[in-house]
Amino acid sequence: MSKAIQDLYPDSLAHCYGCGRNNPAGLHLKTYLEGDETVAHFTPESKYIAIPGVVYGGLIASLFDCHGTGSAAAFICKAENIPLDAPISVRCVTGSLKVDFKVFTPAGAELELRGKLRKIDGRKVWVDMTLTAGGRVRAVAEILAIRLKD
């Protein structure tokens, strides 16, 4: 996938703080479909710390939120054979998000988020995710994303 799923959202649905391209103050997270997984990379600025040297947990939850809903949209497109090279009408919102922090996430390191589809059931999509830094899993999450009606 050469374009991020978030870059395929229509302008009217691209204002999210975490991943919206139309939010100049946002984080601009980008999620890509790679085979049966999704991947995103993000390097937090120094302002996103909890204690010196450690990333703030709320940022990690925000990244999982946006990567999870983007992953859900990508997995729906894949399941429905919707091409991921032009604007799409598929958009998801968070129904629930559970984050488990395993070990501190170091500030200044590139973070990698990965998502795997667990299940699609109608408008509901479950995605399991990991966040790694320095080759070590720092947090895991699961999201229930809900597909918006067209």
Image (cartoon, rainbow, N blue to C red):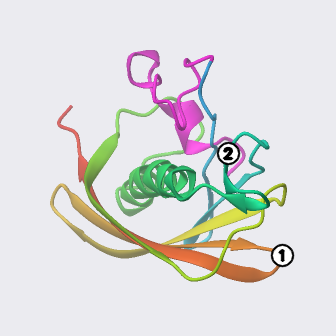
State yes or no: discs 2 and 1 in contact (Cβ < 8 Å): no
- Give the magenta range: 1-24
Q: Residues within 10 Å of mark 2 (few under 14, many from 20)?
A: some
Residue 128 visible somewhere in the drawing? no
The kind of residue on which mark 2 rests is Tyr
Q: Residue furthest front?
A: 51
Q: Is residue 126 above or below residue 47?
A: below
Residue 96 visible somewhere in the drawing? yes
Q: Nearer the viewer, residue 65 or 79?
A: 65
Q: In the rendered image, which residue does mark 2 sit on?
A: 48
Q: Nearer the viewer, residue 5 or 18?
A: 18
Determine the residue positioned at 40% across, 51% down.
Answer: 69
Which label's residue is closer to the chain start, 2 or 1? 2
Asked if the stretch drawn in magenta spans residue 21, the answer is yes
Which quadrant, please, contains the C terminus?
Answer: top left
89 sits to left or right of 31: left
Determine the residue positioned at 35% across, 33% down.
Answer: 89
Q: Provide residue 2's location: percent of width, then percent of height.
A: 72, 46
The kind of residue on which mark 1 rests is Gly
Q: Nearer the viewer, mark 2 or mark 1?
A: 2
Q: Provide residue 147's location: percent of width, then percent of height.
A: 24, 47
Q: Is residue 9 above or below residue 117?
A: above
Determine the residue positioned at 17% across, 36% down.
Answer: 149
Q: Secondary structure at mark 2?
A: loop
